[in-house]
Amino acid sequence: MGAVTKPDTAMFDCREAYVRTVEEMAATDERIVAVVNDSVGSSKLGKFRDRFPHRLINVGIAEQNMVGVGAGLANGGKVPFVSGASCFLTARAMEQIKADCAYSRANVKLCGISSGVAYGELGATHHSIEDVAWLRAIDGMTVIVPSDPWETEQAIRAATAHEGPVYIRLSRMPVPALERSNPHFEIGKSEILHEGGDVAIIANGTMVHRAIKAAKALASEGVGARVINMATVSPIDTAMLADAAKTGAIVTVEEGLKQGGLGGAVAEFCAENAPVPMRVLGFPGFVPTGSASWLMDEFGLNAAGIATAARELLGKRA
Amino acid sequence: MICIMPEPDGRSTATIEQRAEHVRERANWMRRRFLRMIVDAGQGHPGGDLSATDILATLYFDVLRIDAANPMAPDRDRFVMSKGHCTGALYTAMAGRGLFPEEDLNSYLQPRSRLNGHPNRTYLPGVETNTGPLGHGFPVGVGIAVAGQIDEADFRTFVLTGDGELQEGSMWEAAMFAGHRGLGKLTVIVDRNRLQQGAKTEDTNGLEPLGDKWRAFGWEVVGVDGHDHAALLNAFDDACEPREKPRVIIADTCKGKGVSFMENQAGWHHGVPNPEQYAQALAELEAEMA
Ligand SMILES: Cc1ncc(C[n+]2csc(CCOP(=O)(O)OP(=O)(O)O)c2C)c(N)n1
Ligand SMILES: [Mg+2]
């Protein structure tokens, strides 16, 4: 395989792939509607509204109502894409997500926009770093964190085909289009984007291209780092994890909280089934004021930070 | 610079005209100062800042009984910025009142700054609660007023909300409870600029008849021009009279007030003026004081 990030490649905002795909599907699938909270602009749904005015439901600034209305629309046979800043969509409407979507097994697609620390300077209220930990804890909730435009499109299509609640965590932070020798997306299946047998780096979302960059730096030092893109956090790809543990060392990295997210999911599986030294990279908690890129660097969520963690772990390999 | 502050009993010895003129000068300074902050930081919410400036100036430069040297004094008046995205207006008002040095305004949104994009009480004394997600400040303000009611305390609680913010269910849960408790020392000001982030409130999820809704929840309702400083002062003076019900001041405002090309434009909810626009905005604001 050995897919790599092209150097100096163009960068993309995955919201574009998201709205393009929803619009394309909506053109042939009458069931698809969008539900928003005064977030037509930030969700980039202006064109969708112009094309399908009666299928864009703006409830105003009311996230709990938005998710409840989404569940009701699903009951009425619609496939609602409930779309808003992921911080408010998840934090504010958590009980609606739990009771109305997951516990009721409603066919609602929750699209969290500008997740992670994309809203940098706006502060911790506007960061969505707890979302994966929260939603992963809810029974029956599928959680997908796409890494680039192609995977975003695949995730939207797969979520539509999937009967049941799905959370798709999108970013507004620019990412490159990843190279894949064998592109294939399936909910619950991960992919290897860089081969290596000394350590496994498990990433998703905006961290995948950074992990590939780290793996290349490690390769030049003779360290084989396997980069696994774990787009689906729940249900997690346990076969891939069992294999990754065989390298003897696992680093996880996510644009999210260190506790309970992707790293937590990997650690839970490995602790019980394939104990292995691990490093979990993420944000420790509420972070100070600062831009998104400053925060990522400050907390080591970049290629250098990932490579350092991998090197440190090599000495502790099982 | 003269500073006309109320006497300890809440009554100013100055005439209403003098007080209004003082607030007007301070409001003009706030507008010029936070536009500079937004330009320097490369982001901000100028529309809602400009909409709320005259209300905040009236509160911070006249109405609020707070001691800048002791911002956590238990008997201080409480002000809660429920529409927490408008930190340009809030921080200039707080700095102008002496709650922190004016030069700190230069650090707006910079790494590790105390001046976060939304107010944070753990960074900045004088902020009562962290806001930013809409629909949070008001319920906390109700809790503060309930504490004052239990203790029969003298302090008053003021909460500034957006009008779009009133679409959040938590606002009406708080309104219902405040009415039920008869929180006579609680005053809510609604910044009724008729715009939310992407469109008009009435085209999105209409609020009218807004006064009737508050009245039905047990509130006294007052309407005021939210850019008329004398009218605002009168409304606040009146709000400080002892009474049985909480009071809401529905302030008729203009989003973007004072900068012609921003006025009533949803597009300026967030955004940054370019150099020409910034120069024009400053010229307009300076002309206003000439
Ligand atoms: C819970 C929540 N949902 C969405 C947002 C995003 N948001 C920030 S400001 C705003 C519009 C607010 O409109 P309004 O209350 O009328 O404020 P103003 O017009 O005074 O700026 C929105 C939707 C938010 N901050 N919090
Ligand atoms: Mg408004």
Image (cartoon, rainbow, N blue to C red):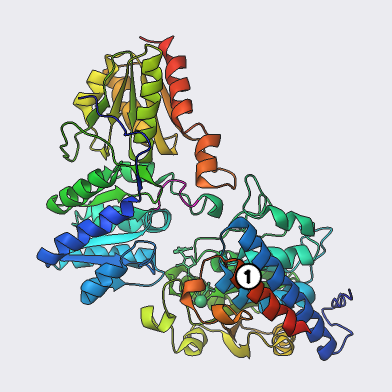
Residue type pointed to by label 1: Tyr
Beta carbon of the mark 1 residue lies under 8 A of ligand 1: no
The residue most toward the left is: A28
In this rendering, the answer to whether B33 lies above or below B25 is: above
Q: Which residues are magenta?
A: A114-119
Q: Main secondary structure of the magenta part?
A: loop
Q: Residue placed at 57% from the left, 63% from the top? A: B44
Q: Residue placed at 81% from the left, 89% from the top? A: B16
Res B184 quadrant in image: bottom right
Left or right side of A154 for B20: right
**Residue marked by disc 1:** B278
Q: Residues within 10 Å of mark 1 (few under 14, many from 20)?
A: some
* Percent of width and height locating residue B277: 59, 72
Q: Quadrant of the C terminus of chain A?
A: top left
> Does the magenta portion include B269?
no
In this rendering, the answer to whether B239 lies above or below A266 is: below
Q: Quadrant of the N terminus of chain A?
A: top left
In this rendering, the answer to whether A182 lies above or below A225 is: below
* Percent of width and height locating residue B41: 61, 56
